[in-house]
Amino acid sequence: MPNIKSDNPLIAGKNMTHVPQPCTLVIFGGGGDLSRRKLLPAVYNQALDGELPANFAVLGFALEDMDDVSYRDFAKKGVEKFSRQAVDDHHWPDFERCLHYLQGSFDNPEVYQQMKKRLEEIEATFGIPGNRVFYLAIPPALIETCVRQLKAAGLVMPVDDVSPFSRIIVEKPIGRDLESARQVNATLCSSFDEKQIYRIDHYLGKETVQNILAMRFSNVIFEPLWNSRYIDHVQITVAEEEGVGTRAGYYDRAGALRDMVQNHILQLLTLIAMEPPWSMSADVMRDHRQSVLNCLRPITSENFDQHVVRAQYGSGFYHGEDVPGYRREDGVSQDSTTETFIALKLFVDNWRWAGVPFYIRTGKRMPKRASEIAIQFKSVPPILFNANHDQPLEPNVLALSIQPNEGLSLRIATKLPGAKLKVFPVKMDFRYGATFGEQSPEAYERLLLDVMAGDASLFMRRDMVESSWSWIDTILNTWSSSRTRWLPEYSAGTWGPLEADRLIENDNRKWRLL
Ligand code: BG6
């Protein structure tokens, strides 16, 4: 199969403004799960693909008792288990030289002085001009401590034309409501300039998510139809097969609305609903996405149940095995009212989307892992091929599959072969794997390179985080005033509760079968 990427000069040509700069990546929580599963494998894949800057190093920083040698071993095990590409034993010894470790406590000022010294040594060895990316892969409660210590140790450089750069990457959750999100943002902004802050949402790094913009704005055929005149409704599904697993401590305090909707799903929605930006620059892109958040119609307590359904998984099946219900999972309180599933109907109140419902559903312990955005167009008029009221034609649907089979498909009506004039829906399918013949880079790979290149367009700005929380808070407030002691249940391995079906069926529509 030809390599479409390298054989095509238009694709192979790099965008010269987007070049990852030499730097040291300092991973706070470098001995933790995110580091082992995602960050170190991401760096390794970038190295294999030749995407890293020539002068680059990693400094893992955490409490775990390790040194450079054992950290390299820890990294190799993580890469072996979780990397997109297998470990190349030829290449590994050369790669692992860039991995270093600093053991210490996040609140100890002396450790930050040691960090400074280690960084200077590493920079001298690797020819790195003092640029540093601090990745906070730590629980949210530690953000404030780390940020203040970095500042106090003189590790945050000013934003000007002469200093090396200091950038900070912050993981979700940024707060658990508007007020706490504001506090986290205030802490970050007390030590770093907004231009230095990269609030990561890994959904924005997924290949198909980025393709939403490419598809909308590099084809002429979609945009003229992309409005309430032609679109009947939009469905966004993010279904997970797994249960809460080992994360009950975090999840039972969060739930699906905070864990998935506030960040990932609202971000998907902004990409679908935004106006065409006039430039790809970070602030223009984010201004346009922010405008969508500004237009979200608040879900008030009136008609609340017609717009919001939450539920919890009960016992059921996962890959043919019995699995316990949510309240029986390790670490979950037996009277928990945390939702593991949510379905929403929402509206974007602007000219383009007036009256178009967006139906959203996400949950754990669903029948399969499948994330999709489906744009369902309006029906053709009830004449000619659509004249039979008993068998209306199925409308066109553009379905963007985010995972696991990345691609897009368009449902169109065609004539069935034969003497009779019968119309039948068929799908035009595009799959990344089939066309490009290789696995797409993982979201973290792309996003880390963006930070090294100083491109914040796929990261969340302060106002975006706060606007999302402000919208989410109205739902949280209604829930907390209802003082529910029991949530509807759905059996593990099913598509959610009956109430979720009713939410969409009351509007004479149906959830898509995935
Ligand atoms: C995380 C959530 O942000 O995203 C998890 O905290 C969820 O609960 C995960 O499982 C889903 O990510 P992905 O990339 O596997 O769809």
Image (cartoon, rainbow, N blue to C red):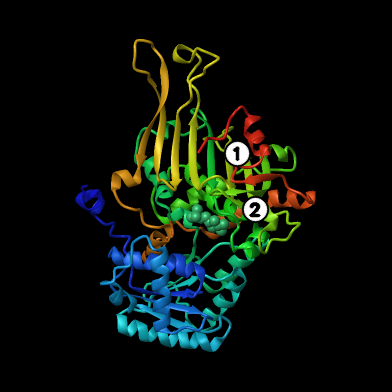
Left or right: 132, with 462 as reference point: left
Residue 305: image location, x then y, percent: 72, 39
20 w.r.t. 382: above or below: below
Residue 440: image location, x then y, percent: 35, 53
Q: Which residue is mark 2?
A: 470
Residue 451 found in image quarter: bottom left
Establish whether ligand 1 lies closer than 8 Å to the Cβ of label 2.
no
Residue 299 found in image quarter: top right
Residue at image point 29% right, 68% down: 88
Residue at image point 50% right, 41% down: 273
Residue 335: image location, x then y, percent: 76, 57
329 w.r.t. 487: above or below: below
Q: Which comes before the other along the chain, label 1 or label 2?
A: 1
Residue 211: image location, x then y, percent: 39, 46
Left or right: 196, with 346 as reference point: left
Picture disc at residue 347: 1
Which secondary structure lies at badge 2?
Answer: helix
Left or right: 36, with 191 as reference point: left
Please rate how many residues cluster around mark 2, counting C-alpha atoms within 10 Å: few if below 14, some from 14 to 19, many from 20.
Answer: many
- Residue lying farthest front? 321
As measured in the structure, the alpha-carbon distance from the residue carrying label 1 to the one carrying label 2 is: 15 Å
Identity, as a three-letter code, of the amino acid under mark 2: Ser
Residue at image point 72% right, 61% down: 333
Residue 6 in view of the camera: yes
The number of numbered badges drawn on the structure is 2
